[in-house]
Amino acid sequence: MFELTQEHEDFRQVVRDFAEREVAPHVAQWDREHHFPVELMPKLGELGLFGLVVPEEYGGAGLDEGGFTYLCLAIEELGRIDQSVGITLSAGVGLGINPILTYGSAEQKQRFLPDLVAGRALAGFGLTEPDAGSDAGATRTRATLTGGQWTIDGAKAFITNSGTDITSVVTVTARTGTDESGRPEISAIMVPSGTPGFTAEPAYDKLGWHISDTHGLTFSGCVVPEENLLGERGKGFRQFLKTLDDGRIAISALAVGLSQACLEAATEYAKTRTAFGKPIGVNQGVSFQLSDLAVMVEASRLLTYKAAWLKDELEAGRRSVAEVKQAAAIAKLYSTESAVTATRIATQIFGGNGFMEEYPVARFYRDAKILEIGEGTSEVQRMVIARGLGL
């Protein structure tokens, strides 16, 4: 069975110290100004966070085993300070680096991975479309192969890390034909930034995640070489399903960081805020809510790191894909719904101050809801879990 080692905890402390030093002093201003901190990316790279699952030949950590668990620890600790910074790392690795690392050719890996690992560049993954969200198989973006070139036409929505000054490439799913049964053949194709016909639309005006970079993308007669196909033709659907399984565990870690931040902030406030001549934390109405929150944090963390451990065990050939898929869905469902509840509890304990942007729980409240939507909605997680039960 899994447990975090002393090496894991030492690593956690390194990332926590970094987040409190490099992120915490600036996060309120970044959030207020909707500023994407491109200057932070090389620092994340220098700390090795983008390369935790990447071999040394591409500049990564070259960990023999356990890299995904280390990544989740990093995401949790960044997410404890700010969810936008946490999702930037999560998407940068899970949606940017991992597809290239897993399915890319030797040339594609050598071309893109070193800069991505170093934080000199970011990559995005274009799956969701205006009319294809949970039903990702309904992709309408098309790519036609003619004369050794793909011509791509279509649109993507809500794509993270897709329009920054250092975005180097976005991998997009597109219909490239039909299979033997007449169903759409979906492939993944890499589109470098700056390719004519590829446009990152203006950044979204979002409820939360103000620091995260998120754009809609359009492709109009966008031409890339045939060798920009990522993996096998027609395997794009299978590829992104595996990508999402991994991403769900990472989002769970992000949710754990948020719940932990809410527990710490609300507990400290309950000890120092007085009403009727005593700290509000001595009242059962407050202390019981914090007790419930502590239970949710502990359960979320255990579910998340069990799933991360299973993912690492899968990579070592000791577990099955089905086990990881089920554990990922369970962790993602519970931890994200708990995080939304955690922000509601924390904001309530802060009272009127919780409604003020000068207190971080207001930002936590805004940032939480997307956790139940991104990387598969709560409804989708329940579908996955039910199928795992044989239903």
Image (spheres, rainbow, N blue to C red):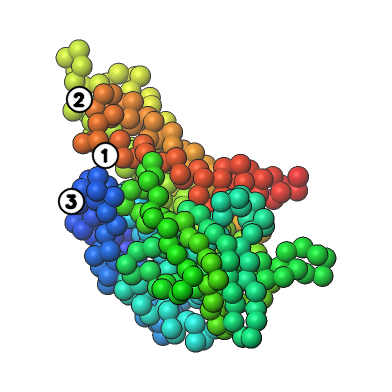
Q: Residue at x 67, y 45 (%)?
A: 383
Which of the pair 239/327 is nearer the observer? 239
Q: Residue at x 56, y 55 (%)?
A: 129
What residue does disc 2 label?
273
Is residue 209 positioned above or below 108 on the image? above
Amino acid type of disc 1?
Pro
Label 3 and label 1: CA atoms lie apart by 12 Å
Tell me if label 2 and label 1 are in contact, CB under 8 Å: no
Numbered tag placed on residue 25 in the rendering: 3
User: Quick check: 83 left or right of 248?
Assistant: left
**Viewer-nearest of discs 2 and 1:** 1
Q: Residue at x 28, y 29 (%)?
A: 355
Is residue 363 positioned above or below 252 on the image? above
Which of the pair 178/79 is nearer the observer? 178
Pointer 3: residues within 10 angstroms few (<14), some, or many (20+)? few
Of marks 3 and 1, which one's residue comes earlier in the chain?
A: 3
**Viewer-nearest of discs 2 and 3:** 3
Q: Residue at x 35, y 64 (%)?
A: 164
Q: Is residue 37 visible?
A: yes
Where does the image place residue 54, in percent across and percent down from the top left? 43, 75
Of marks 2 and 3, which one's residue comes earlier in the chain?
A: 3
Quarter of image, res 363: top left
Numbered tag placed on residue 360 in the rendering: 1
Label 2 and label 1: CA atoms lie apart by 16 Å
Amino acid type of disc 2?
Arg
Where does the image place residue 249, in percent across and percent down from the top left? 50, 55
User: Quick check: 339 left or right of 220?
Assistant: left
Which of the pair 341/284 is nearer the observer? 341
Label 2 sits on a secondary structure element that is loop
Quarter of image, res 172: bottom right
Amino acid type of disc 3?
Pro
Pointer 2: residues within 10 angstroms few (<14), some, or many (20+)? some
